[in-house]
Image: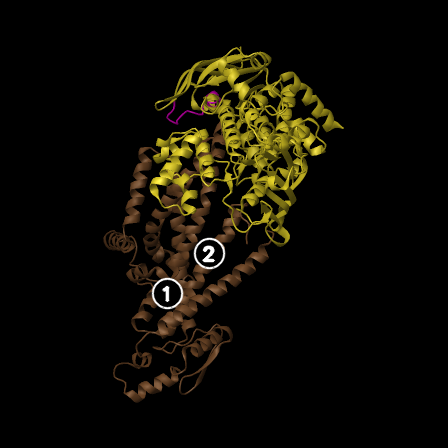
Amino acid sequence: MSLVQVTDLTVEFGDLRAVDGLSFTLAHGAALALVGESGSGKSTVASALLGLHRGTGARVGGTVEVAGVDVRTAPDEELRRLRGAKAAMVFQDPLSSLDPYYAIGDQIAEVYRVHTRVSRRAARARAVEVLDRVGIPDARRRSRSRPHEFSGGMRQRALIAMALSCEPDLLIADEPTTALDVTVQAQILDLLHTLREETGMGLLLVTHDVGVAAESVDEVLVMRHGRVVEHGPVADVLGAPAETYTRKLLAAVPRVDAPRAEFPAREVRGGASPEGRTQAGPDVPSSTEDVVLEAVGLRREFGRGKRAFTAVDDVSLTVRRGETLGIVGESGSGKTTLGRMLVGLLEPTAGEVRDDGHARVGVNPAVQMVFQDPVSSLNPRRSVGESIADPLRARGERDEVRIRGRVTELLERVGLEGAHYDRYPHEFSGGQRQRVGIARALAADPRVIVCDEPVSALDVTTQAQVVALLAELQRELGLALVFVAHDLAVVRQVSDRVAVMRQGRIVESGAADEVYDDPQDPYTKQLLAAVPALDPEVAARRRAARRELAAA
Amino acid sequence: MTGFTGFALRRAVGAIVTLLAISVIVYVVFYATPGNVAQITCGPRCSPEQVHQVAQQLKLDDPLYLRYWHFLQGVVVGQDYSTGTSVEHCSAPCLGLSYQSDQQVMQIIVGKLPVSLSLVLGAMVLWLLLGVGTGVLSAWRRGRLSERALTGVTLAGVATPSFVIGLVLMIVVCGQLELLPFPEYVPLSDDPEQWMWNLLLPWLTLALGEAAYFARLTRASMLETLAEDHIRTFRAYGVGERSIVGRHALRGALAPIIALNANDVGATVGGAVLTETLFGLPGIGQELVHAVNVVDLPVVVGMVLVIGFFVVLANAVADVLYAVADRRVVLT
């Protein structure tokens, strides 16, 4: 009998059918990935496996059998015994998924005791044991820490330890690495892989990231609108996709190992600047008047006295007309702080920002910003047209007819409709909201736009569209872009030059292809080695290489 | 607890500054208002000479800032007062002498304080038990009939003025059922049992109204916590609903309860006038109202300061409890 048997599963929330007639099986010890974009229903399936929809008002149809338990009809008590003991779940955000008020060891012990009826002391010992198993150093002492005292990767390890505590037959991992940095992601995926080899438990991985799936599973099930698009062995589905949607999805995934895709229109652009750009060495300006934005010895500290922390430490860079400078780094590397100083949202502690060779005073409207989260960076109580008009009004424009005309033009420029002026942010999808954010940045007629993680909140297909829009705008308006992101592949796909940041410093910079194909700094090498490969074979080879690297 | 001494020190300094600010405001408001204090103190039948004499005795001719300075001196080092025939020493912290009785204000307050503290602390225990208990229960039984009934009762509790509750309690319990004698304050040191029986109705009166607020707050913040991700984790691991509500959700809901409690305890020390009056308890609130009525300014100023002291103290205790409840809080 299979470990998981899902037949004709439907889940409805009110009028919305999130999962629509889904069937699949998972054998003991096998690994399956549910891959899909947001809204595809993949997380809903994961919740349905543990019967988490019970009592929430969602309507569940079809049958779900996990480890011999019929999840839909089992009495509450039987379902409770399934959860955690036979099938355990690891969630996306390890910080919010743990109780902030209790020690991590106590939380694991509590779960263990629910299912085993052992003494407190024995449960505590078990907690230390599993924490040690997932690689928490000094597990006995750290088991007394609370979640906020752990780093993101350690929290995810702790959550995996909780899942392991009762030795389940099935591990359900819902986007287990989405909130993590790429190097930490690689560690967690490797850990899951090792644990699976050792314990023989089955894995159901839910992810939007095709690369993560390629690294971790034997079988892939691609989902869209609650239905199966394609289902098969990972090498087949990712290597030779049969369905158009799968092909489209794979094509949209930015590749870290391929050079920047040249957009066709790029070649028709006349003038000296493209040639000047490609010929110029990474940090030698082709001519000084081409430099539109320059940072010299930027430094930024937060806090005072003992708690002082240097977020950005002596960073210098130049941005030339019409080029894209990618700034890549993990969380805490100072890339966002740097971006904010370039725009003038933060004052540097030392060093200066120069526009066209002149030290900047105050804020320069010619340098604009596009923010990461298109939801929180737009005022939900004002129409998008009003938001886009802000820079115009700030400049002193009072003529309502002209403002409306210009905003309409901008909306159309970014691929929206002029009639969207009076709509509110919640009426738009994530990608459309980000387009609104771009339109707002364009309203000030900037020469430089600093994009802080502009696509990290978006699905890959939407991501590709927004990246294409930015490239098109750059080409037509001669904009310079500073593209700040943690995603190495995206940065490669958009940048002429890249700077790799770590702990507030630039460790390596140069032409994008040079940095990616021939990294010099060990940190850059480590970062690139951690990026999940789309090809399962390559992924396996990389994993072996990482193991050797760790063993050495 | 690391940094606790530093926290206590900063907090103490903050408290002193707050109290100083209160004292300045109160002093200016009461002493700089129009009206002849000497005349009021002396009484309506005093001759102008007598009024003048009183004014001199009270040093009313000195400028306000000088009088305030003397007042502060009294608080810090104590002060000597001549009562015409003898010199009386008022030791620090000296809040001056009552215009009416020539008694030391501090002594008046110290005499009333046990009554007020007995009332407030006892009522606090009751309102926390009743309020938080009801809140937990209605968060646990959310959506069911019993929860709706509880919500209705607590809403009625919020809406009913405390003196109505007190009056009804007294009439029913003492008058008709004759379960308890009509309350009369018995000091704790005299007879703990009588102390408790006599305070039971005042406690209930204060606590029932308060408990309703706590029930609503507890319910709301528990429901908020129950919607958080970590609750989902424990559900997904088969932890029972009782443990989820009682252990995880309640813990998350404690912070606002602590904060509200500190405010209410501080405010009730001087603000339980209605309850005190209704049950004839000679507490701070009653004394304050009396002092205001007869324009006994030193008593008013002293009482306001003491009440302020309790509010500040209660909030400092709350901050410490807050940090104990949530280790992420850094005491600064």
Indicate left or right for B159 with A391 as reference: left
Label 2: element kind: helix
- Residue found farthest to the right: A552
Q: Residues within 10 Å of mark 2 (few under 14, many from 20)?
A: many
Reading the image, the residue beneath label 2 is: B315
**Residue A72 location, quadrant:** top left
Front position in the image: B252 or B114: B252
Disc 2 is attached to a residue of which chain? B
Q: Amino acid at mark 1?
A: Ile
Front position in the image: B319 or A519: A519
Which residues fall within the magenta stretch?
Answer: A46-58
Chain B visual colour = brown
- Residue found farthest to the bottom: B49
**Residue A134 location, quadrant:** top right
Q: In yellow, which chain?
A: A
**In which quadrant will I find the C terminus of chain B?**
bottom right
Q: Is residue A236 magenta?
A: no
Could you say where residue B166 lies in the image, as x and y percent from the top left?
28, 54
Front position in the image: A466 or A415: A415
Reading the image, the residue beneath label 1 is: B284
Could you say where residue A437 lies in the image, as x and y percent from the top left?
46, 36
Front position in the image: A472 or A295: A472
User: Which residue is located at x 42 percent, y 43 percent?
Assistant: A392
What secondary structure is the magenta-colored segment mainly?
loop
User: Which residue is located at x 64 percent, y 52 percent?
Assistant: A306
Q: Amino acid at mark 2?
A: Asn
Disc 1 is attached to a residue of which chain? B
Could you say where residue B200 lies in the image, as x and y percent from the top left?
35, 54
Relative height, residue B104 to residue B234 (above, below): below
Q: Residues within 10 Å of mark 1 (few under 14, many from 20)?
A: many
